[in-house]
Amino acid sequence: MLITNGRIATLGTTNQVIEAGALRIDGGLIAAVGDASALKKAYPDDEVLDARGQLVMPGGICAHTHFYGAFARGMAVPGEAPSTFTQILERLWWRLDKALTMEDVRYSALVCLVDAVRHGTTTLIDHHASPNAIEGSLDAIAEGAKQAGLRASLCYEVTDRDGPGRARAGIEENVRFAKSLAARPDSHLSASFGLHASLTLSDKTLADCVAAAVGASPPTPPGAAKNGLGFHIHVAEHQADQDDALRRSGVRVVHRLHQAGILGPCTIAAHCVHVDETEMEVLAETGTWVTHQPRSNMNNAVGTARVEEMLSAGANVGLGNDGFSNDVFAEMKAAYLAGKLARRDPRAMPGDLVTRLSYAHNARLARAFWPGLALGELRPGATADLVFLDYHPTTPLTAGNLPWHLIFGVDASAITTTICAGRVLMRDRRLLTLDEEAITARSRELAAQVWKRVEG
Ligand SMILES: [Zn+2]
């Protein structure tokens, strides 16, 4: 297929904006990028998709999300408004996840997948919890992702908060899903080992998880990080996590997790808002991925991660959404604004850094889950994950100033077409793989019942 008549923002190492550009897709990969008339002449028999002058960009990548939170939208938290982070967990999230049936799990994922296709996010790393529907939950989500045609890396969050039986079931669900993928590899799916957070995990459960993850590790492909199945855990989102770790083990969260064998280049440490310099060093030394979710951090009033200091310390940092909309531009805007406000310095968190976090860094992070996959840029050999934006700025747009267009001009509602691995998932705002109307109708029924169980 030849995409013609596009204004192509390649990002990546080539980082160009090609006016009147074209892009050739072959076998799910980008085969050529360049001048439209030259490519049309070279490939006259290709099927043509006319971008009609729209901006063509790489698909979005989300480094940390929770599909299971979909039914929380608009839900009132029962009782008094939570005044602390722990109360938010207890009164909202730990009530919602317990209220989910397997069908709710399936539809929560589908709702988020519709949202992802509409907002052009083609790769998502999810962290799932449904304590009363554990076994098979990752398959239910995986089926939705397959149906959508998106890439998803999945895990189940192990925790001690619901007793030893459910902690064991969570471990088994991670292992079962990882092994089933190892037996039947799927280019769109990947697995990690989910853990809730240090504050709900005993030393024994952490040790059980490490032992189970080693047993479930897929064979390491050449060039991939050595520890195979990585972990995905919330880290120091609030000071409460640090207080708990110091009480339990006498050391801070990152040190505790490092001692337990959790950290490494395939592990995601979400948030890291309350880490100190010694912890930043350990994150850097181990190659652990930190993910930044500023919309969630502001909503929970937990503070802002010191992203630039972590990067200076040599840590890997990507951008997630923690269950907010799968709209990378909204998260980028939040990162840009919150970063400046937190530091009270207009030089903090510049637009080009935010763009690197969202595309180049997240693409590197995704390679921990899909070794060899080139995401986040449009160049020959990269995967054909891309979006068209009906964005026609009144000011010059260049490769150099694109980051500030993304923050001040672009809105994800401008996305009209979403393509993943060369397959068109949405064309001219019409979803081609998911039945949005049916998903919305059934979700509304299910969500009303979930809300009743949460209130009860
Ligand atoms: Zn999270």
Image (cartoon, rainbow, N blue to C red):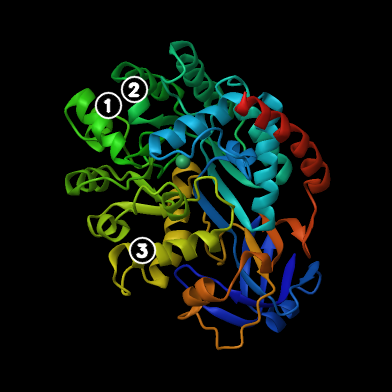
Q: Position of residue 261 (x, y in %)?
A: 29, 29
- Res 155 visible: no
Query: Is residue 217 at least partly visible in the picture?
Result: yes
Which disc number belongs to residue 206? Answer: 2
Rendered view: 222 above or below 333: above
Q: Residues within 10 Å of mark 1 (few under 14, many from 20)?
A: some
Decide if residue 124 is on the left or right side of residue 401: right
Residues 196 and 231: in front is 196
Q: Amino acid at mark 1?
A: Ala
Residue depth check, mark 1 versus mark 3: number of the one nearer the observer: 3
Query: In the image shown, does 299 or 60 lie closer to the viewer?
Result: 299
- Are discs 1 and 2 less than 8 Å apart at CB? yes
Lateral position of residue 135 relative to residue 169, left or right: right
| Cα–Cα span, label 1 and label 3 | 32 Å
Find numbered disc 3 in the image and state the secondary structure of the residue it sits on: helix
Is the Cβ of the residue at disc 2 closer than 8 Å to that at disc 3?
Answer: no
For marks 1 and 3, the one nearer the N-term is 1
Horizontal relation, residue 223 to residue 285: left or right: right
- Label 1's element? helix
Residue 403 placed where, x, y %? 47, 73
In which quadrant of the rendered view does residue 58 lie? bottom right
Residue bearing the label numbered 3: 339
Work out which residue is located at the far front of the displayed protein and give it: 80
Residue shown at 50% from the left, 21% from the top: 170
Q: Quadrant of residue 310?
A: bottom left
Q: Which residue is mark 1?
A: 260
For image coordinates 80% across by 52% down, the residue present is 432
CB-based contact (under 8 Å), mark 1 and mark 3: no
**Amino acid type indicated by mark 2:** Leu
Give how far apart the Cα atoms at labels 2 and 3 are.
33 Å
Q: Residue at the spot x=44%, y=44% of the render? A: 368
The dot on residue 50 is: none
